[in-house]
């Protein structure tokens, strides 16, 4: 299934209300010196990758409830990203997971991507599960395993993932390790870290010259006592041990409660070592909830640092933005539409912050003013700007309303049936 511009235009209907809302906001922002046109352009240019594993129903360790009309293969997943991109105009990239979504027919997959205006962003390896036919088990670790042969198998898998990514036009490899321990004394911390560093270096050394390595961190889960790459500092250290094209990747859900993630972002960007960003939201841990559903203000503060870093720290690469969420009870496509909108909204609000006034207030130790400046931006209803950015590229005025009025899910069920199951978690 593919949505045409005509279908979307017809779902948009009359744009008079939008014009009125946009003009009101544009006038207001212009009065305070905002260049509305360039703001809309920044929003229209901002693209977030959708991971290939997020298009079907997610699950928990207690169970999984399938969603009707799920994509049953990679081609269908690409079609789903195409639908998201057609509606939102912000999902212009896909992030593949290997081996869940190893292409069978590269030409066909690339053709679907081209047809939908989608590029292949960072590609993800998997050494947290055993794969059918693999010689060794990762039960006791992969890149950090005590057994050299198992580490070699994990390194080779990552190299294979890079070869797959090269055929598609990806330029970065994301590594997330489940390696760690569930019980004190289970393993030597120092040896596990040293093995991980050596394995990462082997992967890095074999990377093509125009590729980067993104190293994700997480404090716990699936291991509950320690993880080898537990925090940004460990990831940063490993990235430095690899080289210039190795970076830290921040996943919003991979922090202990109340961690100041915006400060981590600022620190990494100041050092030119932030390479990628995974969006989701959470109340307790790595909950994988819809972006912006629980802590939208924290997301705004994070975007404030991202915007600052993108302006002042050019030594960071173009960040690999991705939604890393799980859809256990919502329609995955509707959930992703909500996440994409929340990301755009936080970005737009961060772009509205009066940085000159803020830095002046900081110098004057005017704490009250500092907060007022941030909240002035945060309280602005930026949705007409998002609408204008989408419309400028042929997207939907309201992606969610269009998704429903065009009966996308009903059509997918008719095409694919009620009981297809997507590969993934
Ligand atoms: Mn992630």
Image (spheres, grey):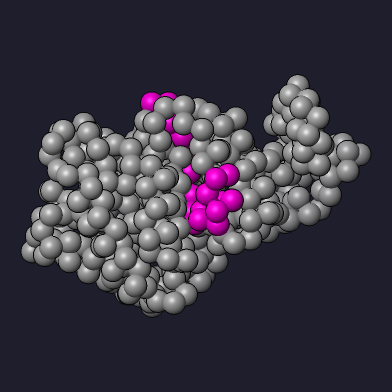
- Residue at 42% from the left image edge and 27% from the top image edge: 257
Quarter of the figure with residue 164: bottom left
- Whether 395 is among the magenta residues is no
Q: In percent of the image, x 55 and y 57: which residue is there? A: 272
Which of the 4 quarters of the picture holds residue 26?
A: top right
- Residue 11 locus on image (x, y percent): 63, 47
Give the residue at the far right of this rendering.
31
Across and down, in percent, residue 233 comes to 41, 45
Farthest top residue in view: 368
Residue 353 placed where, x, y %? 74, 39
Compare residues 128 and 226 and report the one nearer the observer: 226
Left or right: 43 with respect to 315? right
> What segment carries the magenta color?
266-284
Residue at 44% of width from left, 77% of height from top?
209
The image shows a total of numbered marks equal to 0
Instruction: Judge whether residue 178 can be spotted in this image.
Output: no
Q: Is residue 347 visible?
A: yes
Residue at 15% x, 33% y is 183
Which corner quadrant of the image does residue 52 belong to? bottom left
Residue 134 placement (x, y as % from top left): 11, 63
Please indicate whether residue 36 sits to the left or right of residue 330 in the image: right
Q: Is residue 89 above or below residue 359?
A: below
* Residue at the outermost front position: 190
The N terminus sits in image quarter: bottom left
């Amino acid at each position: 299934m593919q949505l045409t511009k005509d279908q979307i235009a017809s779902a948009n209907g009359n744009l008079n209300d939008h014009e009125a809302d946009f003009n009101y906001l544009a006038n207001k922002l212009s009065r305070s010196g905002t260049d509305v046109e360039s703001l809309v352009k920044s929003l229209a240019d901002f693209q977030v990758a959708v991971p290939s594993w997020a298009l079907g129903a997610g699950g928990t360790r207690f169970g999984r409830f399938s969603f009707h009309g799920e994509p049953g293969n990679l081609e269908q997943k690409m079609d789903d990203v195409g639908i998201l991109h057609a509606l939102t105009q912000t999902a212009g990239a896909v992030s593949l997971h290997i081996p869940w979504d190893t292409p069978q027919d590269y030409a066909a997959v690339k053709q679907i991507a081209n047809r939908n205006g989608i590029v292949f962003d960072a590609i993800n390896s998997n050494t947290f599960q055993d794969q059918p036919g693999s010689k060794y088990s990762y039960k006791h670790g992969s890149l950090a395993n005590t057994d050299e042969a198992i580490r070699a198998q994990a390194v080779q898998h990552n190299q294979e993932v890079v070869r797959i990514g090269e055929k598609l036009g990806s330029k970065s490899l994301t590594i997330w390790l489940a390696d760690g321990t569930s019980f004190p004394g289970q393993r030597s911390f120092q040896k596990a870290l040293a093995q991980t560093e050596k394995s990462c270096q082997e992967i890095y050394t074999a990377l093509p010259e125009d590729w980067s390595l993104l190293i994700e961190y997480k404090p716990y889960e699936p291991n509950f006592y320690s993880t080898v790459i537990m925090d940004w500092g460990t990831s940063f250290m490993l990235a430095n041990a690899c080289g210039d094209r190795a970076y830290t990747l921040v996943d919003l859900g991979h922090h202990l409660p109340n961690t100041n993630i915006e400060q981590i972002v600022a620190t990494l960007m100041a050092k030119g070592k932030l390479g990628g960003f995974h969006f989701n939201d959470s109340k307790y841990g790595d909950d994988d909830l819809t972006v912006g559903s629980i802590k939208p203000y924290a997301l705004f503060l994070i975007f404030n640092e991202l915007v600052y870093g993108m302006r002042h720290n050019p030594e960071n690469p173009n960040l690999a933005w991705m939604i890393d969420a799980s859809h256990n009870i919502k329609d995955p496509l509707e959930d992703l539409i909500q996440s994409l909108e929340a990301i755009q909204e936080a970005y737009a609000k961060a772009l509205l912050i009066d940085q000159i006034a803020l830095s002046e207030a900081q110098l004057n130790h005017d704490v009250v003013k500092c907060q007022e400046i941030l909240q002035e931006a945060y309280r602005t209803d930026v949705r007409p700007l998002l609408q204008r950015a989408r419309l400028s590229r042929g997207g939907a005025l309201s992606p969610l309303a269009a998704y429903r009025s065009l009966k996308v899910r009903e059509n997918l069920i008719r095409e694919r049936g009620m009981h297809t199951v997507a590969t993934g978690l």
